[in-house]
Amino acid sequence: AAYFQKGLRSWLALGTVSHLSMVGLGIAATSPAAGSGAAWMMISHALIATLHLLIVGVVIERLGTDEIAALGGLARTMPQLTALWVLTALASVGLPGLIQFPAELLILTGTFSSYIVRRGIFIAALLSVLISAAYTLPVIRKVLFGPEKKAAPDLAPTETIPLWALGLLVIGLGFTAAPLLSEIQRTVGPLMQAILFQSLGVR
């Protein structure tokens, strides 16, 4: 559904639904890996969604619209915003090295090995990762690199600092996720095992 949205706000909203469905799947799988991935997905989504909303807010404030058809060629006049938006989009589709990749990997591997989740649901989750790229990247290509529709000034210094701070977190936490995930797994793993044993009637 996100592929057919005409406005950036509704496009982001449906993308959020997709990411939160992965969180739900990770919890439902009741495996330590998937549960840890769901916890990390909530952290990564909070950062990515915040950055995405701020970027879209800048676009709306500068150009007075969020209609995708009315936007294009922003990379020519807004290079800093373009760099941040490309980074955010790649993070949201789970590019390795960025913050969301460990979450998706753990959820998918945990779901595959789960006794609760059927294989068809795992395949649907795997396809959803590919679909997220299919509805995210064309919008980025059109709005940033398509024919220029409206020109706008780039980020002001007061906008650059907080946005790049979030952008650096998206990169930094992608490369340094291991120690944080270890702490998450230490807490979430036993909880997921307890839920699984209870659902299977094991005492």
Image: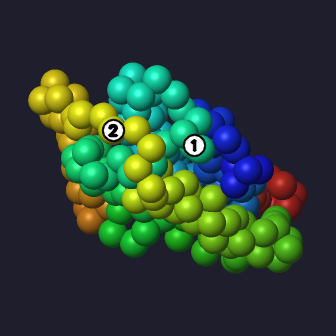
Residue that numbered label 1 is attached to: 68
Query: Relative to 77, does residue 107 appear above or below in the rendering?
Result: below
Amino acid at dot 2: Ala
Task: Identify which residue is drawn at 39% across, 22% down.
Answer: 61
Task: Identify which residue is drawn at 40% across, 38% down.
Answer: 150
Residue 1 visible in the shown view: yes
In the rendered image, the quadrant that contains the C terminus is bottom right
Q: Report whether 13 appears left or right of 70.
A: right
Q: State the SS at label 2.
A: loop
Relative image position of residue 48 (x, y in whole percent): 43, 45
Relative image position of residue 156 (x, y in whole percent): 17, 29
Q: Nearer the viewer, mark 2 or mark 1?
A: 2
Q: Residues within 10 Å of mark 2 (few under 14, many from 20)?
A: some
Task: Identify which residue is drawn at 77% across, 75% down.
Answer: 123
Amino acid at dot 1: Ile
Q: State the SS at label 1.
A: helix
